[in-house]
Image (cartoon, rainbow, N blue to C red):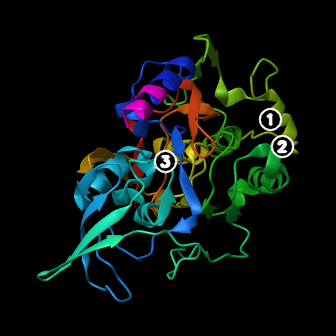
Amino acid sequence: MNNLIININKILKENYPLEISFDKIYSLSHFYISSNNYNKFFPFNINIDGVILKGEYKNYKIIQVKTTKILTWKQYILLYVSLLNIHVNPCVNKDTFIKILHTNNYLDILNIQKIKIKKNKNIIDYKIEYKDTPSYNLSPDNKFNISDKDNHFYLESFQVNKNYEKLKIEIDRLIKHRDKYKTIHFHLNNNGGGDNVPAHLILRCLVGNKKEKWMKNIKKIIKNKEILEWDCWAEETKDSPNYSVVQKLNLDNLPNYDTKYNGKIYLHMNKRNGSAVFYFITYLIYAFSTKINRYSEKCYGQTIKYGSIESDQLILLGHSGTSSGDVNAIQIKLNDNIIVNCPTQQFISSSIKKSDYNRFWIK
């Protein structure tokens, strides 16, 4: 564990442009340690409390684990959570955490060798051998209803290079027919993010040509400490770093409404939404909500920030992902099985309030 901390701190110092240490890695959206073997599975199907759900030892509870240390089940869970990004905290995304928990981990401190299980007065020591095939199903249902109504817009990915054709169709349609719709539905289910450009263009279409007070420039610090600033609400200008992204979309027309959209907007979110989607959701909240309710909860050793809104126009459906404003991660191999993804850039000011980074929006 000490070597891991030393290595992580070194990687952060060499690549991330702001000062941060190992104990805060959970707060960086694009920092994560890839150390799970998704081809090896825990022999028991367990819940977050360590209770075995099926089989010969059903209803036995794990009270102790042995890795390179002997830990109680609670200590093990807290340790595991501390090494993951905040979006995988069990209070935010229990399904994903449980799936990760059931896989073999190449980090010795998380690799379970033995467990002690208890039911009533019976206590059993059990040597763990991870299995090639699980005897249980951990895949959540990711099916979503699709409407054929033309006021429903499906934004499956904001990665322009990979999804520019679909994005062009949806954004062109919105720009052309905005005021035809009394209600607009944006479907963001499983949109893992990508470029912020689609979010900026769609918001310009909905807000109109008059820039609102919350619409600020982006100022970004990069690995070599250089600071870049530009007007992200005019990405089509040639001096914008995202000029080529706008060109790739090849829109029929850029947004050019004098008025603000006055209909209702339904925002279909889910926990797999990536950083660019968080920007899109937060922009809409700033533009169309009348009141924002912000609060925090302590959960598994981390502070989780939530937000809900009051609005006559914007309706949030589901639970968003989040972002910390860091971008452009690189991969660094610690060994053949462990890869560290570390961001090399950070937004130091933008339209997003600093207090809203790492916030999850809920209905």
Residue placed furthest toward the left: 121
Mark 3 vs mark 2: give the one in front: 2
Kindly report the distance in space between the C-alpha atoms of the residues bearing marks 3 and 2.
Answer: 26 Å
Question: What's the amino acid at mark 3?
Answer: Phe
**Occupied quadrant, residue 330:** top right
Most common secondary structure along the magenta stretch: helix
Examine the rendered structure and indicate whether residue 129 appears above or below residue 136.
above
* Label pair 1/3, CB-CB below 8 angstroms: no
Seen from the viewer's position, the closer of residues 16 and 221 is: 16
Examine the rendered structure and indicate whether residue 138 appears above or below residue 285.
below
As helix, strand or loop, the secondary structure at mark 3 comes to: helix
Examine the rendered structure and indicate whether residue 152 appears above or below residue 253.
below
Residue 3 counted in the magenta span: yes
Magenta range is 1-7
Q: Identify residue for label 3.
A: 288
* Image mark for residue 167: none
Q: Identify residue for label 1.
A: 245
Q: Is residue 237 visible?
A: yes
Question: What's the amino acid at mark 1?
Answer: Val
Kindly report the distance in space between the C-alpha atoms of the residues bearing marks 2 and 1.
Answer: 7 Å
**Occupied quadrant, residue 58:** bottom left
* Image mark for residue 249: 2
**Occupied quadrant, residue 55:** bottom left
Residue drawn at 57 percent across, 11 percent down? 225
Q: Position of residue 271 (x, y in %)?
A: 49, 59
Residue drawn at 65 percent across, 43 percent down? 199
As helix, strand or loop, the secondary structure at mark 2 comes to: helix
